[in-house]
Amino acid sequence: MYRLLIPKILPKKIEHVIYIDADTIINLDIAELWNINLKNFPIAATPHFFAFPDLDIIQNSIQIDSDKIDPHDYFNSGVLILDLNKIKKLFNTKGKLLNSCVDILLKNPRNNSLDQDALNILFKDNFFKLPSKFNRLVSWINLTSDYKNTYGIYHYVGNTLDTNFQLPTNRIWFEYFFKTPFATPDSFGNLFESFNQTILVCQQVIENSCNIFRKMIKASANRRRVFWVSPEDQTLIFEEFGHRDDDIIINATRDDALQIIIQMFEKFRGYIVVLICTSRSKIYDIHDHLSSIGLIENVDFFNGLELISTQQIRADFNRIIRDM
């Protein structure tokens, strides 16, 4: 949220600002970005669609209750050019940019990108669209093997950095890391120690997954399986768990999905077992609801993500990077 205070806290003589998130590598001449003509727009940003051209995924990630944002125009706020004079004219009261964003978030409590969503609403149809090279999302590059052009600003959103040195995006990050004062014997000592710890964690994850999987097989032997999953993840989930003709699919994106599950348990308790295969943040909330009505985890319902060991291992391997 600090980026929203930039127009307020910087001296008046500063009229032009580049804002860049901390989880980026600038693998180009920053003067290219500085010299862009904003053409009377108050800000410039890269639309998600330029770097992540899957509209279905973008649409599913936008949770704006009152203001419909076109997925083609939804931008990532990790790299911004700001014309402070124009922003101040739009928000002429001190701190009004921040206050306006807070008001939007209070009115749209489901927004999961916070100030980014608020900025998209405030500057809807009023921002200059930057080319994708100025905000290349590593998650999309790794997914599509788009490695040909390494010139640009690389944005390592989420757990996209790991120790797979076959990926040019990881190699670029480490190339710059080795040039910093942080590349010390201690950091490499931490790297190897963390690697050893991670191997142990991965072994434990696999063992835990096997134990839970055995319980799931036993629980679902004579009961119908109910999968709580988003439509775009169904193929992946069925690759992991197989697909039975009598499986029931509940769309996790439905607002009434939880109520549907509860009603099913009220009617068919002991005859169904639910596998929850949705985001981790939702799993914790769902777990509490199901437990509150007397359902038992790993008997009546299961965290499906815990049974997909590769996802767990990938998350744990990111500890290596953090520990450096």
Image (tube, rainbow, N blue to C red):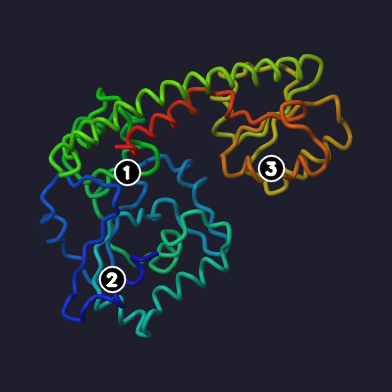
Amino acid found under the numbered disc labelled 1:
Ala
The answer to whether residue 233 is above or below residue 124 is: above
Which quadrant holds the N terminus?
bottom left
User: Residue, x 34% and y 72% (percent of image)?
Assistant: 5
**In terms of depth relative to the viewer, which is nearer, 16 or 183?**
183
Give the label, 2 or 3, closer to the camera.
3
Q: Residue 157: where, in percent of width, then height?
A: 36, 44
Amino acid found under the numbered disc labelled 3:
Ile
The numbered mark, 2 or 3, whose residue comes first in the sequence reads 2
Measured Cα–Cα span from mark 1 to mark 3: 33 Å
Crowd class of label 1 (few under 14; some 14 to 19; many from 20; radius 10 Å): many
- The residue that mark 1 highlights is 51
The answer to whether residue 266 is above or below residue 117 is: above
- The residue that mark 2 highlights is 42
Residue 286, disc: 3
User: Residue, x 30% and y 27% (percent of image)?
Assistant: 163
Crowd class of label 3 (few under 14; some 14 to 19; many from 20; radius 10 Å): some
Residue 24, disc: none
Q: Is residue 228 left or right of residue 126?
A: right
Amino acid found under the numbered disc labelled 2:
Pro
Q: Residue 97: where, in percent of width, then height?
A: 39, 75
Q: Quadrant of residue 99?
A: bottom left
User: Residue, x 15% and y 44% (percent of image)?
Assistant: 181
Q: Residue 96: where, in percent of width, then height?
A: 40, 79
Tell me, yes or no, whether the two marked residues, 1 and 3, touch with CB atoms within 8 Å: no
